[in-house]
Image (spheres, helix red, strand yellow):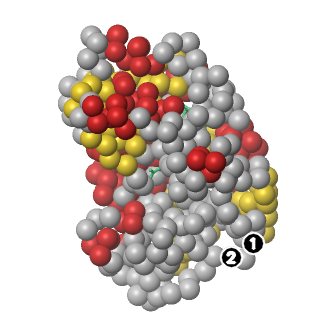
Amino acid sequence: MKAVVYEGPRKVSVKEVPDARIERPTDVLVRITTTNICGSDLHMYEGRTDFEPGRWFGHENLGQVVEVGSGVDKVQVGDFVVLPFNVACGHCKNCECGLTNYCLTAQPVPEWAGAAYGFADMGPWAGGQAELLRVPWGDFNCLRLGEDAEERQNDYVMLADIFPTGYHATELAHVKPGDQTVIYGAGPVGCMAAYSAVLKGASRVMVVDRHPDRLAKAAEIGAIPIDDSKVDPVEAVNELTMGLGADNGCECVGYQAHDPQGEEHPNMTLNNLVRSVRFTGTIGVVGVYVPQDPGAKDELAKQGEVAFDFGQFWFRGQTMGSGQCPVKKYNRALRDLIAGGKATPSWIVSHELPLDQAPEGYEHFDAREPGWTKIVLHPGD
Ligand code: NAD
Ligand code: ZN
């Protein structure tokens, strides 16, 4: 089968690799029809991780079941399914509490948390930017889709990661109807957090970034764009909220943050966010921070440390939640919002490409080229 294989920093190619196949009775084999490039893939693509050359990416996957193991009894051949990016066993202590993002079985290394398809340090699972994907614990990990799945793949595929992750950011930040919410980052995840805040009935959603095309995307759903290369975002949020600050806010950027001058500056977003949120406000951080970032410029950052202004955070009496999204916690309800015509997350898609053009897609998305907001790949095309 063909897959998008990592060759080394900023180099991927579409190559023949061994076919994915059923390996255990609980496996499901899926023919991938839609698979996304994610901002999280860029951590590996840019060579910031120990992802081994020869492995392939892909954790935002949707497709049709072509074979099931003898121990699978819910999922059937022919079903269209979307796969949460978290690989989870469904039976460990964490999975039983709904914490599928910290499955203790799918992640074999105790000091690493959680498992995912095609990801550095997140277990041995192959990615879905390929023609076929092996889904372990298939009954647990496949979310079955309805009859409209085939025509609405670009909506449903967002259930694998960015829609639930954006939603999770708003849950961690306790976004409620009527709230004024600020989102840092207008990438795909930030846009989905903004969308989730809009769906929850936030009265005002402010989105900070510096890419005009991404800010324009956020404005399409009624968010107020704030360009931090032109204005101080903390001042802008304070002005929009009569000096009080937002009720809550989401960090959808991660350790690869840049300051408005284009320098790498991992503490920039967190500290701005704390200052943009009111006293006793709530914050959700879904942008990825890592225990080690060997590619970082200074020694502290290499150890994954950021200069977080804890004094300001404490002084303001704020609360913060963080971490990977437990996709399964949200994806059924979000699927039903899509099916019921109440949500259409495909508005984020800017490009649809056949698998062969994935290298081009990576190049443009990594460069944050204007207009390249979210790329979906269709292996069958
Ligand atoms: P992305 O890189 O496409 O988007 C990030 C955006 O943040 C960019 O538009 C960039 O211009 C903007 N940005 C950079 N510095 C900024 C700053 N100081 N202030 C405001 N905006 C700034 O990535 P994405 O796909 O949207 O993902 C965002 C983050 O979420 C990444 O770290 C990704 O790994 C992470 N993520 C987390 C989870 C999870 O489960 N927690 C899931 C998916 C993705
Ligand atoms: Zn992703």
Q: Nearer the viewer, residue 186 or 290?
A: 290
Badge 2 crowding class, 10 Å Cα cut-off, few under 14, some 14 to 19, many 20 or more, is: some
Tell me if label 2 and label 1 are in contact, CB under 8 Å. yes
240 left or right, relative to 128 = left
Q: Quadrant of residue 22?
A: bottom right
What secondary structure is found at the residue carrying circle 1? Answer: loop
181 left or right, relative to 48 = left
Instruction: Give residue 32's mark.
Output: none
Q: Nearer the viewer, residue 352 or 259?
A: 259
- In percent of width and height, residue 213 lies at 59, 23
Q: Which residue is mark 2?
A: 19
- In percent of width and height, residue 7 lies at 79, 60
What secondary structure is found at the residue carrying circle 2? Answer: loop
Q: Which residue is mark 1?
A: 17
- In percent of width and height, residue 286 lies at 43, 46
Could you tell me how many numbered marks the image carries?
A: 2
* Residue name at image x 55 percent, y 38 percent: 266
Q: For the residue marked with disc 2, what is the amino acid?
A: Asp
